Image (spheres, rainbow, N blue to C red):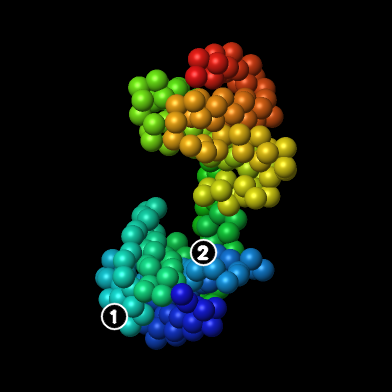
Amino acid sequence: MFTAERRDQVRARLLDRARSDVRISGAAITGSATGNAQDRWSDVDLFFGVDGGVEEVLRDWSHFVYGELGAVHHFDLRPEPAVYRAFLLGDLLEIDLGFTPATGFGPVGSGGFQVVFGEPADRASTVPADPAHVIGLAWHHVLHARSSVERGALWQAEYWISAVRDHTLALACLRLGFPATYAKGADRLPAEITTAARDALVRELEPGELRRALRGATAALISELHATDPVVAARLQAPLQELAAMA
């Protein structure tokens, strides 16, 4: 398991390499290291502006991370024009490196962005998640959770029930101004919200338990709908309660 000292050394080594790479026009530290949130388990998060082709730089840097830092696997996120590559090292340290054309080098959303060198460009603000879309996903998942239970597809039912719970927490985060993705704001939610969501936790992969958890997930969703959008809540409450009662 990596140590905090090892993590800091890796970050410093990557930034030194960025300074010596003439294709890198700017570098920034992102994630928890930009504030007071970094702890023993934090990753290395860096974002780079690139003069020229991003794919060539990504390939070269990947060879370095595998060959010199001991990566064992990676995966990409590609919100154009940027590419984010997440590496797992053999000592379980995660390195998240973002590369974007120089014109796109700048902060994204509300996350931390600490410039190390280079001049950040003005970037359009990211569009926040649409509560209406999250609500749609939530009622869709209630419907499919119930049908999965009835079909005896227990693992699938558990998947849908957990997703209902996750979308309910996301709605609450959006309403209260907390980060909504990856449950980043969930631990900051009021106890009355998270206590209700506990009833959606599946404790055993058994039809009766899945029905109970679905009823709990649906009740928590309805409660949040009334807080997020009372008009929509009034339309959805009866059909959602019917689905939960049938379960």
Gap between marks 2 and 1 measured at Cα: 29 Å
Instruction: Say which of marks 2 and 1 sits in front.
Output: 1
Report x, y in % for residue 170: 57, 40
**Crowding at label 2, few (<14), some or many (≥20) Cα neighbours within 10 Å?**
many
**Labelled disc at residue 216:** none
Task: Name the residue type under label 2.
Answer: Gly
Q: Earlier in the sequence, mark 2 or mark 1?
A: 1
Circle 1: is it few (<14), some (14-19), or many (20+) Cα within 10 Å? few
Task: Residue 191: name its quadrant.
Answer: top right
Residue beneath the point at 55% across and 51% down: 125
Residue at (36, 74) in percent of width and height: 90
From what the image shows, is residue 111 above or below residue 174?
below
- Give, as a three-letter code, the residue at label 1: Gly
Do labels 2 and 1 touch, CB within 8 Å? Answer: no
Camera-side residue of 206 and 230 = 206
Q: Secondary structure at mark 1?
A: helix
| Quarter of the view holding residue 99 | bottom left
Q: Residue at x 67, y 68 (%)?
A: 36
Q: Is residue 87 left or right of residue 195?
A: left
Report whether residue 104 is seen.
Answer: yes
Residue matched to label 2 = 106
The residue labelled by disc 1 is 67
Q: Secondary structure at mark 2?
A: loop
**Where 72 sits versus 153, above or below?**
below
Q: Is residue 213 above or below residue 170?
A: above
Q: Position of residue 228 (x, y in %)?
A: 65, 30
Residue 114 is at least partly visible in this image? no
Say which of 194 and 17 sits in front: 194
Residue 179 is left or right of residue 150, and the answer is right
Where's residue 121, x and y in %? 51, 64
Q: How many marks?
A: 2
For the point 44% across and 72% down, the residue is 93
